[in-house]
Amino acid sequence: MQGTPLTANFRAAPQIGEADIPALVAAGIRGLINNRPDGEVAGQPTSASLAAAAARAGLAYRHLPVVAGAIDEGQVVAFAQALADMPGPLLAFCRTGNRSATLWALAAARDGRPVEEILACTARAGYDLGALRPRLRDASSR
């Protein structure tokens, strides 16, 4: 699982497992952002197990869990900070990749990237975030 690129330094992906980490390293990924709360579904890898596997592989790792449909401003700020602090290229993941793509889009809007450019990036990656347009516009005006 190498994820889908939204930019040269950022990819969004569905849930990864420990077994995926060597391929991610081989693909040049240098950091992982886990946007999935622990215990969301039975059998999902825990953040602690993924953090340990990432550390063994030399990857930066951050757990920023969000609930689908309930992403708040503080979570967007924390995600933007992770993007700024962590070495890239980065891969963020959740159940389907949609929450990670949404967080990226909101952080990009806060950073001044044009809304239509953000939506084009996410659409090329297979994430239809058109319904997020009003919130992206609000974020870009901060």
Image (cartoon, rainbow, N blue to C red):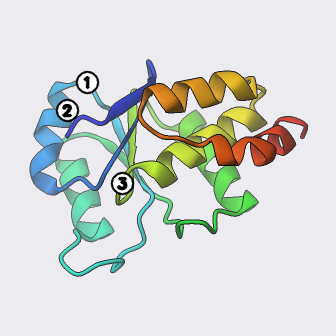
| Rendered view: 97 above or below 23 | below
Mark 1 crowd level (few <14, some 14–19, many ≥20, 10 Å Cα): few
**For numbered disc 2, what is the local secondary structure?**
helix
Q: Which mark is residue 25?
A: 2
**For numbered disc 1, what is the local secondary structure?**
loop
Q: Residue 91 location, x and y as percent?
A: 37, 39
CB under 8 Å between discs 3 and 2: no
- Outermost residue, right direction? 141
Nearest the viewer among 74 and 41 is: 41
Give the residue displayed 65% in from the left and 59% down from the top: 75
Q: Is residue 69 shown left or right of residue 50?
A: right
Name the kind of residue labelled 1 in the image.
Answer: Gly
Name the kind of residue labelled 3 in the image.
Answer: Thr
Nearest the viewer among 3 and 85 is: 3
Q: Is residue 82 shown left or right of residue 130?
A: left
Q: Which residue in the structure is indicated by mark 1? A: 28
Mark 2 crowd level (few <14, some 14–19, many ≥20, 10 Å Cα): some
Figure label count: 3
Q: Which residue in the structure is indicated by mark 3? A: 96
Q: Residue 107 location, x and y as percent?
A: 67, 40
| Quadrant assignment for the N terminus | top left
Tell me which label, 3 or 2, sits earlier in the chain. 2
Mark 3 crowd level (few <14, some 14–19, many ≥20, 10 Å Cα): some
Name the kind of residue labelled 2 in the image.
Answer: Val
